[in-house]
Amino acid sequence: MRRSTAAAVGTLTGAALIVGVRLSVSAPDVTAAPPAVDLAGKGGAADSSPSKKPTKKPADSEESEDEAGDSGLQDGTFRGAGAKNPYGTIQVSIKVTGGKIVAADASYPTTNDSATINPPAVAKLKEATLEAQSADVDAVSGATFTSESYVKSLQAALDQAGG
Amino acid sequence: MRHVEHVMGTAVSIELADPLPDADLTTMIGDVCAWLHEVDQRFSTYRPDSEVNRFARRELALADCSPDLRHVLDACADLWRATDGYFDAYAAGPLDPSGYVKGWSVEVASQRLAAAGSTRHYISAGGDIRMRGHNADDRPWRVGIRHPWEADKLSWVLTLTDAAVATSGVYERGGHVRNPRTGAVAQGLRSVTVVGPDLALADAYATAALAMGEAGLTWLPKLEADGYESAAVTDDGRAYTSNGLPAAV
């Protein structure tokens, strides 16, 4: 549980950094992860001094856990303002229970504009019909034959016919 | 004028379609054959005293190698990188750049013919072909790609002017292509053909794709950006072509 909470905070911090950079959302102190998101202006930023760092050391984990209890975060689910970029809108949300962030998520576009960030994959070979035809040709390309097996090749027949 | 020369362990077919005096054409063909025999002497791994083998035995320092051999070594290193390691001149252990040398020697031969005044010819070294201009009927050359199971049939016909066509397959000298990463005989693809401007590269690409197995089907399309089109047939008979393959309708 503690581990998952830390993961959630870490994810949120990453998302918050992205959102903050993209929109220049008022984030004077980006190390304060939860406030940086400015959750829909819902007073989530009331506490501007949570000491919880995203890069907490193992030794600090117990302390951080304690602080989470009086972090000043209101319970509930909060959504950040949508961050628009050339590829669509990204929206971050967190769920707070007992003053702790217990879940973090981000919605992102999967259609329309997002297609430009995920252009069609590299070209593919197309499946074709394997024919077995006889045709008038000047030369034949095939797996390299030996000097001995040449005589049985189509190329040998062409060379003979061509004189 | 046509000619067949047995050299480099295979048969090399040459056709010159230039409207030039026979004496000139004969001289040109003689020059091509002399060059191919020279390459065989210098680069064959079957000849203990070849330059390649002397270099491999460290009797010859890199700095003392001919510019040709240094070019071949550089090209093999570049191809090793470009093919993700699937074209490997050291796949069998000791240095063996034959997979590059054959296509390169024909590429050089075609350049020499062009320099000597031939603008319409093809040279096929055992099924790997470099051509220029038009055929004797004033049309683009028509090159058939051998059917991977029926030796007397074709699976595609290409129309080409200045281009190279190389095919690697497992049907002629079964199992001679190995996956250099595993050492196992390549499986998954029965035949790979690559068409593009340079025969040495086309040949190496075809060999690499065959060594990759079915994964080669997703690697080959990446060559299109460099002007190399492809066609491939899987072991179970599925056929694939790149979008720009110049196949005759």
Image: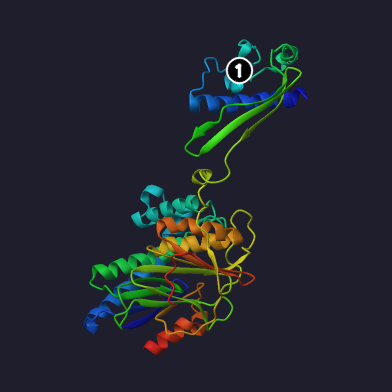
Q: Residue at image x 50%, y 39%?
A: A87
Instruction: Give the residue pinned by disc 1.
Output: A35
Specify whether A78 is left or right of B85.
right
Q: Quadrant of residue B238?
A: bottom right
The x, y position of residue A122, in whole percent, is 51, 53
Q: Residue furthest left?
A: B21
Q: Is residue A20 above or below residue B106?
A: above
* Any part of residue B55 in sight: yes
Q: Is residue B81 above or below residue B232?
A: above
Q: Nearer the viewer, residue B69 or B128?
A: B128
The x, y position of residue A71, in whole percent, is 69, 13
Q: Residues within 10 Å of mark 1 (few under 14, many from 20)?
A: many
Which amino acid does the dot numbered 1 rest on? Pro
- Quadrant occupied by the C terminus of chain B: bottom left
- Total count of labels: 1
Q: Is residue B228 above or below residue B191?
A: above
Q: Nearer the viewer, residue B197 or A11?
A: A11
Q: Nearer the viewer, residue A5 or B237?
A: A5
